[in-house]
Image (cartoon, grey):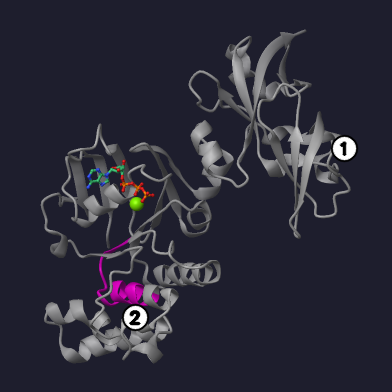
Amino acid sequence: MALVTVNRLCKEYSGHVGLAVNNVSFTVTDGEFMVLLGPSGCGKTSVLRMIAGLERITSGDLLLNGRRINDVPAKDRDMAMVFQSYALYPHMDVYSNLAFGLRRRGIPKDEIDRRVMTAAGKLAIAPYLTRRPAALSGGQRQRVALGRAIVREPQVFLFDEPLSNLDAVVRLTTRNEIIKQQKELGTTTIYVTHDQVEAMTMGHRICIMNQGEVVQIGHPLDVYRNPTDVFVARFLGNPRMNLFKAHVTHESGDLVLHFAGNNLKLPPQDQPGLDKYTGCPVLAGVRPEDFYEIEPAALQGRLARLPAEVIAVELLGAEALLRLVLPNSEEEAVARVGRDTKLRTGDTVMIGVDISALHLFDSSTNKAIPCFNRS
Ligand SMILES: Nc1ncnc2c1ncn2[C@@H]1O[C@H](COP(=O)(O)OP(=O)(O)OP(=O)(O)O)[C@@H](O)[C@H]1O
Ligand SMILES: [Mg+2]
């Protein structure tokens, strides 16, 4: 049983202006896989290292199962950390790398052997037990680093971008390995990444950080569907969400949203949330997959049409991306459409947008405007 509570954690480094970590709070429940996600420099590693005990906590509380452990040394925290750089002992073979921490703790030889052989079997590194790290591939090294964490049977796993140095194929297999092991062992896990695909596929929940602060915490799909602000909306999703300048007017008792050359009468249930934005500038967000070249039967009556000029077509095999210029928009928009699109550069098109999938943001605060009920 391991419950990790981070309460108003701050980190100040000498030589770094302002707080690198600013009032970060979250709870990771027993057996949960929590991902810390955010752009480079947002403070993810700093949070993880404070949890591990490798970095002093400037202020705030760190609790393990309700007990404050701010001042407990790293070695007594019963947490195992896996680093991007593997951090294996180069002069020891794989067996000794796996066994080292256990030997130091005086665990009996038989028990060490049992744990090492079990982990090596699970991670398919048994054939390499007598090799040194230098004679292993990156993926094999990272599996050894993972094995070293597993054999400790810690209360908490901490991962800091463990897959960043691996090529795409090995990355995928190692990612699946981590998911599988975590599920089998049920160990509470905190996993740092700036890769949104890892976050979406691995995390039970994700905690999105920006500039030292937590911006949003939630189930990956909930966050994707209901981003709390423009930052999260554009950080999650590739290609990123398209944004259009928009405004709302009252017309004969209805609210109308004007954006990208379209005047869209809003459904009555969405009007209360938007009423106060009448006359104010807002931002309308459309994910690339919510554009439609051809109206699917399931969306009949829910599509708005926007005039667009196709400035490029990227045929990616499984799908196609259209780069579009729409009226009144400063940046080009991207639409993800079927691979058999007939559209070509220079064409004009009335591109469909799923109205129920629109996102609206307050232009002055960049916060999401609650409307367009989504599950
Ligand atoms: N030892 C240090 N001394 C001074 N500043 C530091 C130190 N470590 C980190 N920082 C600063 O703190 C901020 C957060 O760094 P941190 O390494 O936690 O970010 P990160 O989210 O892990 O980034 P990345 O994705 O690039 O690994 C950065 O601005 C960084 O320059
Ligand atoms: Mg980092």
User: Which of 65 and 241 lies nearest the eye of the viewer?
Assistant: 241
Residue in view at x 48 percent, y 59 percent:
202
Quadrant into which the N terminus falls = bottom left
- Rendered view: 255 above or below 221: above
**Where, by quadrant of the figure, is residue 121 drawn?**
bottom left
Of marks 2 and 1, which one's residue comes earlier in the chain? 2
Residue in view at x 16 percent, y 40 percent:
58
Q: Amino acid at mark 1?
A: Asp
Q: Is residue 151 magenta?
A: yes
Residue tagged 2: 134
184 sits left or right of 317 in the view: left
Residue tagged 1: 347
SS under mark 1: loop
Give the percent coordinates (x, y) of residue 341.
Answer: 85, 49
Q: Amino acid at mark 2?
A: Ala
The residue segment tinted magenta is: 143-158
